[in-house]
Image (cartoon, rainbow, N blue to C red):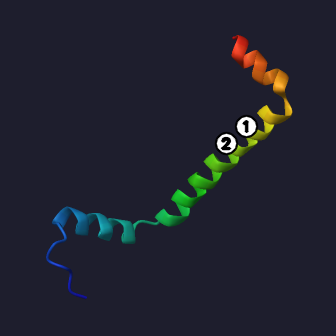
Amino acid sequence: MPRPSHESADFVEQEEWKKSSPFDYAFISNAFLNISYQWNSSIASLLSKNEKLLTLFAIN
């Protein structure tokens, strides 16, 4: 498949490296997003359940 002329050599090299890499980059980035989302939502639910905890943070 011919490559568009506007692609730089670095970009092409990076894409080739991603293809040859054993890791699935989309899967990894989605996993990190899910982890951070769950972490943030669990903190939010903790704080909403424990308003005393929130005031402790505010005092300190």
Q: Quadrant location of residue 49?
A: top right
Kind of element beneath mark 1: helix
Kind of element beneath mark 2: helix
Residue bearing mark 1: 43
Circle 2/circle 1 CB separation < 8 Å:
yes
Q: Viewer-proximal residue, 33 or 18?
A: 33
Three-letter amino acid code of the residue under disc 2: Asn
Q: Viewer-proximal residue, 29 or 45?
A: 45
Residue bearing mark 2: 40
Q: Residues within 10 Å of mark 2 (few under 14, many from 20)?
A: few
Where residue 37 appears, x then y in whole percent? 64, 49
* Residue 24 appears in the picture as rendered: no
Q: Quadrant location of residue 20?
A: bottom left
Q: What label does residue 56 carry, if any?
A: none
Left or right of 18, for residue 44 = right
Q: Residue furthest bottom?
A: 1
Three-letter amino acid code of the residue under disc 1: Ile
Left or right of 45, for residue 11 = left
Where residue 3 appears, x then y in whole percent? 21, 81
Where is the N terminus found, in terms of image quarters? bottom left
Please determine whether, in this image, residue 18 is positioned above or below residue 1: above
Give the residue displayed 20% in from the left and 62% down from the top.
10
